[in-house]
Amino acid sequence: MLSIRLLAVLAAIGIGASLIAWMLTGNPRYRRWAWNFLRAGLVVVFVFLALLALERVFLPLA
């Protein structure tokens, strides 16, 4: 659980820093990085939620 929180904080910092860099420089590369950070963060969250759901389904069988 701690690793998921750490990844969420790192993703939020990466998104924020990329958007600030994009606003300051106008370079669209930073906006693309923010979008990639957001997508990677969402993938991690969905994988984590899927693992929790699988645990709830298969735990009673053990």
Image (spheres, grey):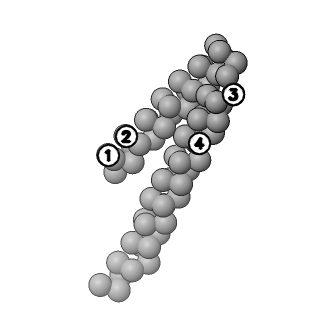
The residue where tag 3 is placed is 28
Q: Nearer the viewer, mark 3 or mark 1?
A: 3
Q: Residue at x 53, y 48 (%)?
A: 40
The residue where tag 2 is placed is 6
Q: Earlier in the sequence, mark 3 or mark 1?
A: 1
Q: Secondary structure at mark 1?
A: helix
Say if mark 1 contacts mark 2, CB within 8 Å. Answer: yes
Give the amino acid type for the residue marked by disc 1 in the picture: Leu
The residue where tag 4 is placed is 36
Q: Earlier in the sequence, mark 4 or mark 3?
A: 3
Q: Residues within 10 Å of mark 4 (few under 14, many from 20)?
A: some
Residue 38 occupies quadrant: top right
2 in relation to 19, above or below: below
Q: Position of residue 46 (x, y in %)?
A: 53, 58
Q: Secondary structure at mark 4?
A: helix
The residue where tag 1 is placed is 2
Q: Earlier in the sequence, mark 2 or mark 4?
A: 2
39 in relation to 16, above or below: below
Q: Position of residue 51 (x, y in %)?
A: 43, 66
Give the amino acid type for the residue marked by disc 2 in the picture: Leu
Q: Nearer the viewer, mark 4 or mark 3?
A: 3
**Alpha carbons under labels 1 and 4: distance apart:** 22 Å
**Alpha carbons under labels 3 and 1: distance apart:** 33 Å
Q: Secondary structure at mark 3?
A: helix
- Left-right relation of 4 to 24: left
Give the amino acid type for the residue marked by disc 3 in the picture: Pro
Q: Nearer the viewer, mark 2 or mark 3?
A: 3
Q: Residues within 10 Å of mark 2 (few under 14, many from 20)?
A: few
Give the amino acid type for the residue marked by disc 4 in the picture: Asn
